[in-house]
Image (cartoon, helix red, strand yellow):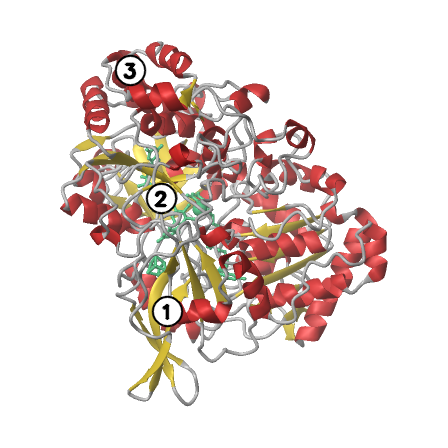
Amino acid sequence: MVENTIKDKDRDEIGVSKEENQFNFGAGKNFEIQDWKASKPWQWEEDGMVVTRTQVWSAPGCHEGCGVLVYSDKETGKFIKLEGDEEDPYNQGHLCPRCLAFNQVQFHPDRILHPMKRVGERGENKWEQISWEEALDTCYREFKRISMTYGGDAIHCHRGTARDNMWQVGRLGNTFNCPNECGVLSGLACYLPRVSLMIMSYGGMQIADMSQFFARRYEDPNWVCPECTIVWGCNPTISNPDFYMGHWVTDVMKMGCKLISVEPRVTWLAAHADIHVRLRPGTDTYVAMGMLKVMIEEDLYDHDFVDRWTYGFDELSERARSFSLEDIEKITWVPKATIEEAARMFATSKPANIVWGLAIDMQSQGTPTAQAVAALWAITGNLDVPGGMCYTAAPMGVDQPSAGGWGYYDLLSEDMMKKRVGWMEFPMYRYGLTQSNPDIELLEHQQGKFKGAWVQCSNAIACMSLEVEGWYEAMKGLEFVAAVDIFMTPTIQACADIVMPAQTWAEKHSVRAHYYFLSAITGSCAVEGEALSDCEINRRLGRKFDADEEFKNAIGRPLDVNGWPWETEDEVYDEILKPSGFTFDELRENGPVYQKYEYRKYETGGLRPDGQPGFNTPTGRIELWSTLLDKFGYDPLPYAEEPGIGPVTTPDLFEDYPLIMITGARTTSFFHSEHRQIPYLRQLTPDPWVQINPEDAAAANISEGDWVWIENHRGRCRQRARVTYEAPKGVIAAQHGWWFPEQDGAEPTLYGFRQSNINKLLANKPGKTGFGCDAKCTLCKVYRCSEEDL
Ligand SMILES: Nc1nc2c(c(=O)[nH]1)N[C@H]1C(S)=C(S)[C@@H](COP(=O)(O)OP(=O)(O)OC[C@H]3O[C@@H](n4cnc5c(=O)[nH]c(N)nc54)[C@H](O)[C@@H]3O)O[C@H]1N2
Ligand SMILES: Nc1nc2c(c(=O)[nH]1)N[C@H]1C(S)=C(S)[C@@H](COP(=O)(O)OP(=O)(O)OC[C@H]3O[C@@H](n4cnc5c(=O)[nH]c(N)nc54)[C@H](O)[C@@H]3O)O[C@H]1N2
Ligand code: SF4
Ligand SMILES: [Mo]
C-alpha cells in the first residue's frame, strides 16, 4: 500500500491544501505536446471577409467550446456567418442548431447593449442607460458597504453552468471577501455529485475514452475502440454533456462497439441499443448493485486489477450479494434477465466504458448512485486503459478555468473559508470543489443573513432554482443585486439594480483548458453596443477593491495581495497559461494544442503528486469502500434507497399524483433557459412540451398538442402534451427552463416565468452528503387545461 499524501490536518481544518484541492487531480507531469498542428493559420482573408478560427464557449452558453471558423466583414468587423471547423479534433466540423442560429443572437434587438440602472421600483422594468464607470462604481460602493457592514459572507455570487467565466465569478466574489459562490441548483446536482465521488474515492476524474485525448482521434494508434459502452442516465446525442460530444458515441457504434442504454425513455440511443435497461426513474443504484452482484457471483470481474489496485472489494461483494435480483426487478421494473445480460455484456467486453449523465446526480442519493456505477468500471479493470475510463488532466498544468480551479485560495482567510456555506456541514464539499451549498444558503437567505448578490451567467428563478418562490422572495428582498448577462431575464427583472452587458464568444478572448487540450478563444468580431467580456468586467471591478486600502485593512487582507493585478484582459490569459509555456498569442497561432496522453498512469506514478504508483486517495488505491465517506460518518459502501418522493416512499402522495415525473431532458433547440427569443430555434420548439405515454394520455382524455396542467402537492404549471411511446407508461417527461421573452417583463408577469416552470413542482432537498436532489424522479398528475385557463 502506498503512502497517504493528503494531509489530515488540512483536511480536518478547512479542507485539503491549496495544491490538492484542485479540480485537476490526476494531472500528468509530462507536458510533451502531441505532434499535430492545425494546417490553417488562425486568421485569413477570403472573398472580402476575415475568417477567424475560434471556439464557442459561452454567451450564448454551452459546455462544449466547439471549433468554428467565423466569417466577419473586412471593413466593419461585423459577424457574417460561421462554419464548423473540420480540423478541430473535438467536434470535427459538427454543429448544433444553436450554433447555426448564432447570427440571430449576435444581432438580436433584445440584447443588452449598455450598462443600465433600475429607475423604478424593482420589477417595474424601468431602466436607464448609464456609463460603465457609474455601473462599476455603484457595484464597488455597494459590495464594499455590504462586505464591511455585514461581512463578505452576506453576499452570494450566482454562477450558471460550466462556461469560461465560472472561475471569474468565484474570484470576483473572493475579492469582495465573499466565500459563497454557486449555482442555486439543490444539492449541486449537476455533475458535482459524480465529480466529488470520483475525487474522493478514485483520486481524480475519469471520462469515457472515445479517442478525444488524441488530436488524430480514431486514427491514433494508441487508442482502442471500446467493445461496449453503457450510456447511463445521459442523452449525449442531444446534450453533448459536460465536455463530451454525442457523435463520439455513434462513431464508436459504427466501429462495432455494443451499446447498453440505461434510460427510462426510448431515446434515439435507447432505440439503437443492444440492450435497453428501461428502469423506473430514480432506481439506478438498484440496477447498478444488481449488475455488480452478477459480475461478482459469476466471477466476471478483473481479479488482477481488483487485487492490486482496489480497496474494500470484499465488503463491496458482501453488500452486492445482499441484494436479490427478484427484488431489484420489482423495484426497478427491469427484468432480472436484462440485468444479467447487461452485466455479462459489459464485463466480458474489453475495453468497455460508461458515458454517464445528469440523471445520476438528479437523485437525492447522487453520491451512492455514482459510487455504485463507478464500481462497475473499476472491478472490470477498465480504469485508465485505452477505450476505458480515463483520468483527465489539467492540460500542460493549466487548471480548467471552467471548473473554478484557477486562481483561488490566495484571497480568503482561513476563517472566511470556514464561513463558506455548507463546508462545515458537508465535508465532501471541501474536496476539489469551490462551491457553497445552495440549500443551506436558501435557508440562511430566509433568515435574513444575505444582503447582496452578484448574478453572472445565471437565470436562477427561471431555470436553476427548484424552490422557485423561495429563491424569488430571497433575491427580491436583498439590499443590492447586480447582474451580467447578454439578455434580460426574469431573474434580472425581478431583483437587479444594475445590469451589465456581456460579450458573446464571437466578440471576446478567453482560454479553453480542456481535459486534454488547450485552445484560445479568439473572438474578433465587432462588439455590439458597449458589451464587455465577463473577464474584463470582473477585472475592472476587482481592481477597485485591490486599490482600496481601507477595505483591505478592514477585512485583514495584506495590502500587497491583489485579486486582479493584470493590466489588460489578455494578461489574465497569459497568466492562466503560464504553466504551459504558451502565451495567449502563441496558443492562438497554434490552434488546439494537445498534451501527450499516457494510459495506466497508476502504474507509472502519474496520478499522484508524490509520483508514486497508485491513486491519489488516502489508501493509494481505488476505494470501493471509501475511507473518507466512513470518516465523515456516511456509509462507506454504495447503498440503494427509494427516491424521496415516489410510489413506495410516499404512497399517500402517489394516490393523488399517480405519474412519475422526469424533468429537464434536453432538446437541441435550447440551452437551458436560453434561446427562447431566437426565431430559428423557437420555430423548432415553439412551446414547452411534456411527453406522455399514449395509455396515460387516453386515460386522461389528452390528445397530442393539448395544453395540460402538470400538478403536484407543491404547485402546477402548463405545457403541451406530446403523446408518445418514448415515455414509459406511468412516467412523464417535462421540459425545464421555460420563460417567454415575448411577454411583459414587468411584475407580476416577469416574462411569464411561472406559467410553464416545472421547477415549481420540485423541492430543495439534497442528499445526505449535500449532493444530489430528486429533480428527475418525483410525482405528479396531468390533466387538460380548460378554455379559460388558456
Ligand atoms: N427541472 C430541472 N431544472 C433544471 C435542470 C433539469 O434537468 N431539470 N437542469 C439543471 C442544470 S443541470 C443546470 S446546469 C441549470 C442551468 O441553469 P443556468 O446556468 O442558470 O442556465 P442558463 O439558461 O444556461 O444560463 C443562465 C443565463 O446565463 C446567460 N449567459 C449565457 N452565457 C453567458 C456568458 O458568457 N456570460 C454571461 N454573463 N451570461 C451568460 C444566459 O443568457 C442566461 O440568462 O439548470 C438546472 N435546472
Ligand atoms: N441542447 C442542450 N444541451 C445541453 C443542455 C441544454 O440545456 N440543452 N444542458 C447542459 C447541461 S448543464 C447538462 S448538466 C447536460 C445534461 O445532459 P445529460 O447528462 O444528457 O442529461 P439529461 O438530458 O438531462 O438527461 C439524460 C437522460 O436521463 C434520462 N433519465 C431521467 N431520469 C432518469 C433516471 O432516473 N435514471 C436514468 N438512468 N435515466 C434517467 C432522461 O430521460 C434523459 O434522456 O446537458 C448539457 N447540454
Ligand atoms: S451548440 Fe453544439 S456545436 Fe455549438 S458549441 Fe454547443 S455543442 Fe458545440
Ligand atoms: Mo448542468
Residue placed under numbered mark 3 in the picture: 296
Which corner quadrant of the image does residue 634 belong to?
A: top right
Q: Amino acid at mark 1?
A: Phe
Q: CA distance from mark 2 to mark 1?
A: 37 Å
Can residue 621 be seen here? Answer: yes
Tell me residue 105's x, y (percent): 41, 70
At horizontal 34% and vertical 75% (from top left) the residue drawn is: 41
Q: CA distance from mark 3 to mark 2?
A: 30 Å
Q: Secondary structure at mark 1?
A: loop
* Between discs 3 and 1, the one toward the N terminus: 1
Which of the two marks, 3 or 2, is nearer to us in this view? 2
Tell me residue 79's x, y (percent): 39, 78
Which of the two marks, 2 or 1, is nearer to us in this view? 2
Give the mark count. Answer: 3
Q: Amino acid at mark 3?
A: Ile
Residue placed under numbered mark 1 in the picture: 102
Q: Nearer the viewer, residue 135 or 711?
A: 135
Q: Secondary structure at mark 2?
A: loop
Q: Residues within 10 Å of mark 1 (few under 14, many from 20)?
A: many
Q: Amino acid at mark 2?
A: Glu
At horizontal 32% and vertical 65% (from top left) the residue drawn is: 37
Mark 2 residue CB less than 8 A from any atom of ligand 3: no
* Between discs 2 and 1, the one toward the N terminus: 1
User: Is residue 41 left or right of 418 when viewed as pictured?
Assistant: left
Q: Secondary structure at mark 3?
A: helix
Residue placed under numbered mark 2 in the picture: 598
At horizontal 35% and vertical 37% (from top left) the residue drawn is: 782
Q: Nearer the viewer, residue 7 or 732?
A: 7
